[in-house]
């Protein structure tokens, strides 16, 4: 499902990107110049500029444009195909410098989405879905085929099972020891799996899941802060507000108002 789309020129010197926390998978294509993300939690982290990016949800970053001005297409999707998900999770993000021919291909995809967005008929969702698949194929085109070993596959499956289980028990805010016990592995082994698969600690992944679920509820429902705190495993509204503000820089209600105004534009 397409959640957000923009396709236009923008001068980032006059109108800098102040984006922060994204809830969806993001494709970013720069038709002129190159860009790179600046990670809010790792400001020291250096990444090479490119003209095609795929970013996973639940990251804090904004975009820096080399030269300041570019024409870009930005598309947010609720999900992307599993091969691309796996690649991005292993690397933390995905970037590629497209050739002139590939940029023309990307532009054709953006043109089709723009036309479908204006038309908004029964075929538009199919165009959006095709765009997501075409962009995913464009991203994976130059990746060498990789046959995962049985051990790698089992490790990936185990991590996905743990994450799925945690989401189902989010309201309980289960401890690390319980998550490990439910998966019949030790806490130390669980930590190793998460470090290899996500390049993050289990605690950080679980915290991101809780905050991601909370921000989704804030943006898409009228649930009270008490209800959201309870459903996402926080001990109290005070605890929820403290953790949320520390991560996003704004209290939940202020973040909700800002997000709703942005969505209404």
Image: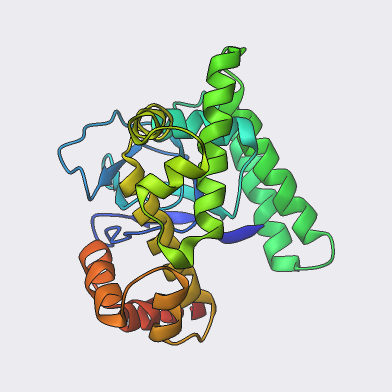
Image quarter for residue 242?
A: bottom left
Return the x and y of residue 133 as percentages of the image width and height: 69, 39
Q: Nearer the viewer, residue 206 or 85?
A: 206
Return the x and y of residue 64 as percentages of the image width and height: 28, 46
Q: Residue at x 53, y 81 (%)?
A: 221
Q: Nearer the viewer, residue 79 or 124?
A: 79
Q: Residue at x 61, y 43 (%)?
A: 80
Q: Nearer the viewer, residue 260 or 52?
A: 260
What is the quadrant of the N terminus in the image? bottom right
Q: Residue at x 74, y 45 (%)?
A: 130
* The furthest residue to the left: 44
208 in relation to 33, above or below:
below
Return the x and y of residue 177 as percentages of the image width and height: 37, 45
227 in relation to 187, above or below:
below
Image quarter for residue 214?
A: bottom left
Let me know if residue 196 appears in the view: yes
Instruction: Describe residue 254's horizontal placement relative to residue 103 as left or right.
Output: left
Return the x and y of residue 95 as percentages of the image width and height: 43, 31
Let me know if residue 205 appears in the view: no
């Amino acid at each position: 499902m397409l959640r957000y789309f923009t396709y236009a020129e923008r001068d980032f010197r006059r109108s800098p990107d102040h984006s922060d926390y994204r809830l969806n998978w993001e494709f970013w294509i720069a038709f002129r110049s190159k860009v790179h993300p600046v990670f809010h939690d790792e400001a020291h982290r250096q990444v090479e500029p490119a003209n095609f990016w795929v970013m996973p949800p639940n990251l804090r970053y904004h975009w820096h444009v080399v030269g300041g001005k570019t024409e870009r297409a930005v598309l947010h999707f609720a999900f992307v195909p599993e091969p691309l998900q796996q690649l991005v999770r292993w690397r933390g993000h995905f970037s590629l410098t497209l050739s002139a021919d590939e940029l023309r291909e990307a532009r054709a995809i953006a043109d089709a989405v723009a036309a479908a967005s204006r038309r908004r008929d029964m075929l538009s969702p199919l165009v959006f879905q095709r765009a997501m698949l075409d962009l995913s194929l464009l991203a994976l085109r130059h990746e060498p085929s990789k046959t995962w070993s049985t051990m790698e596959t089992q490790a990936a499956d185990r991590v996905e099972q743990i994450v799925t289980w945690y989401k189902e028990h989010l309201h309980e805010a289960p401890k690390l020891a319980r998550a490990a016990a439910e998966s019949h592995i030790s806490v130390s082994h669980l930590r190793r799996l998460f470090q290899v698969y996500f390049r993050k600690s289990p605690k950080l992944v679980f915290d991101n899941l809780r905050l991601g679920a909370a921000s989704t509820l804030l943006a898409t429902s009228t649930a009270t802060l008490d209800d959201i705190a309870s459903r996402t495993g926080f001990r109290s509204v005070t605890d929820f507000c403290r953790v949320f503000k520390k991560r996003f820089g704004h209290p939940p209600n202020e973040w909700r108002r800002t997000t709703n105004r942005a969505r209404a534009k």
